[in-house]
Image: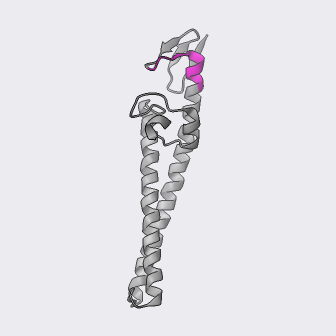
Amino acid sequence: MTVRLSSGTTLAQNWSADLPWGETRNAEQVWRMDEQVQDVQDVLAAERETTAERLAALERDLEGIVEAGRLVATDDEHDPEGSTIAFERSQTGAFIEDARKHLAALDSALERIAAGDYGICEKCAQPIAAERLMVRPTAKTCISCAV
């Protein structure tokens, strides 16, 4: 009997491998992990699409705020409405920066999945706890290295 992974790789039922951090995985454990990674990849791809749409909407909002500021001759320092426009522009800019950072983190996680490095701490090369990845699927480090 064999186990087939999403990559097309087939493993014999009695296959096992010793991992660098001292654990051993058998074919069924690898197959389950492969399924979980596929699920995470789907979640990350959906989150990436949502974040890209949010980023585009925020950029349109910022353009609108800037354009509205040009149409009205306001002096941010002396006009009571000017501070509101400056605040909106600053707040929207911060949201855009956050969305860009999140998009980069999602892309990085998807790249790690493609490279086969997802779930491995980039600092100590130990596995990242499944619980951490469930809460923070873009995590690059284990809890010990993140502290």
Residue 4 vertical position relative to residue 112 in the rendered view, above or below: above
Residue 14 vertical position relative to residue 141 in the rendered view, above or below: above
Look at 38% across and 89% down and name the residue there: 75
Between residue 37 and residue 11, name the one nearer to us: 37
- In the rendered structure, does residue 5 fall within the stretch colored magenta? no
Residue 70 screen position, x and y as percent: 38, 84
Residue 146 screen position, x and y as percent: 45, 40
* Colour mapping used in the image: one colour
On the question of residue 136 being in view, the answer is yes
Look at 43% across and 85% down and name the residue there: 82
On the question of residue 142 being in view, the answer is no
Marker count (numbered): 0
Q: Quadrant of the N terminus?
A: top right
Look at 44% across and 83% down and name the residue there: 83
Residue 25 screen position, x and y as percent: 54, 17
Look at 42% across and 60% down and name the residue there: 97
Residue 108 screen position, x and y as percent: 42, 43
Range shown magenta: 21-32
Between residue 95 and residue 142, name the one nearer to us: 142
Residue 64 vertical position relative to residue 139 in the rendered view, above or below: below
